[in-house]
Image (cartoon, grey):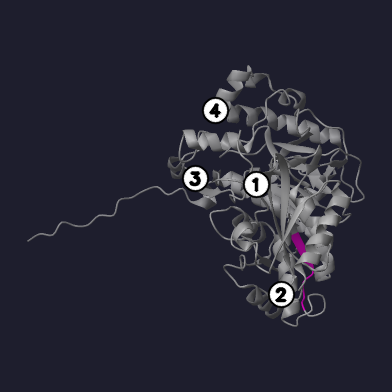
Amino acid sequence: MVETPVTIPEVSIPYAYRSLDWDALVREYPPAPTFFTTTYLKSPEEIRALQESRLARAVAHAYSTPFYRKRWDAAGIDPRAIRTLDDLRTIPTYVVDDIRQSIEAHPPFGDYQALTFADAARGPLRIFTSGGTTGRPRPTIYSQWDRNVGAILRARAFYLAGFRPGDAVQNTMLYSTHNGAFIVDEALYNWCGCIPVTTSAGIVTRSRRQIELMRDWGVRGLVGFHDFLMHLAETAKEMGIDPVRDLQLRNISTMGGKPRELEKAWGCNASENYGMHEVQVVASECPAKEGMHLWLDAFVVDIVDLDTGAPVPDGEVGSIVITALYKTGVPVVRYDTKDTARLLSRDRCACGSSLPRISSILGRADTMVKLRGINIWPEACGEIARRDPRVAGEFFCYAERRDGRDEMVLLVERKADVDDDAALQRDLAEMLRTELGVSIVVEVRPPGGTQELTRFGIEAKPRRFEDRRPKG
């Protein structure tokens, strides 16, 4: 009997190492430290010229997708006419609900993707989703170009934060279908020369073990969301470890919080950066610590009125609208993020850069509740409550309709040794009324009593708000 030989079919593989023009990548989007001696120091006029040189390509690419084409055709927008930043601002914005509707109408990926899985035959692709803290997770396909530009942008933030080659940096971002942990790792490993210590969040590596690794391995840098990093500092103290005296931590890069609070808790430098699932890091704090510089070689950023969408004067609170100039997988043009901030200054910073600076994120416009004519954000309620030493730090807000009017309810966790919930509830309600000018309903929970709602340590970042008011 003659056996038929088994053959292995030969298939061309798009190897990562030769699927990208690496020289073009670093020429267009310089990594640190080159960025900080070149683009970072350009004049406002030079930055605008750079943005406009990349704008037409970004707009044309967006128009190639059904999502943008339908919207722009309906609005009478000719993408060929968009050549300047002023032209760009004639394009209508879109919001996260538009993306969700796209997914529902064209499951499972929507009609906003410019790439499909079949394109992986030509070059490496990755797919991640948003964290899902404000709704159903949104999938995004990333090309090799997008991943590496995004990692460079994140690495710039790490360089400003003080991370240097040879530093062991603990990455506490949750490894899941969410993008955050992976892009941190790629930035540290590929573009910083750092050693990633991939502990992930508490659900993966328990908090006490995270502190042990930090101590035993001589970790010098720490990355994560503000709330979890504050929790780790408290965990260290519970273990009899002084975060300031007993650890070798030197620098922290954080998202979504107050870096000065982290500096106090850990006794080291802390720097904030701002970004999101779809576009990576958009802005980062420099050593002057007077706001976050916008990476305007990669983005066009506007801050607009929450109601009208018109640009707001510098210094006023508005919603951040983003256009990404580098994206190939999912184009992002005039995305109204609903993250609220202020544009602090366009003047040259003490660090030497003229890149405009924005404030920390003040909250989300889509979680704002108007009570008796006053705009209330969950984050503001939580920040006020945390000032009371009896509060453990975790909080959750929900809006509901009571007796025919809207109310905000704040749930806070007390510390374990607090034995008078009624007094804490009364004091917090009075403090909130005094500072916000409107009454907030307060409910006190025991330690861990909000986790089912916040998903703290379980999801990529904690949930802080739910709207329970009747729809319509």
Identify the element where label 4 is drawn.
loop
Q: Is residue 11 left or right of residue 65?
A: left
Question: Label 2 is placed on what type of residue?
Answer: Thr
Which mark is on residue 149? 1
Mark earlier in primary sequence (2, 4): 4
Magenta-span inclusion, residue 250 = yes
Rendered location of residue 249, percent (x, y)? 77, 72
Label 1 – label 4 distance at C-alpha: 21 Å
Of 8 and 347, which appears nearest the observer?
Answer: 347
Residue 224 in view of the camera: yes
Cβ atoms under marks 3 and 1 closer than 8 Å: no
Q: Residues within 10 Å of mark 4 (few under 14, many from 20)?
A: some
| Residue indicated by mark 4 | 64
Cβ atoms under marks 2 and 4 closer than 8 Å: no
Rendered location of residue 428, percent (x, y)? 81, 59
| Residue indicated by mark 2 | 235
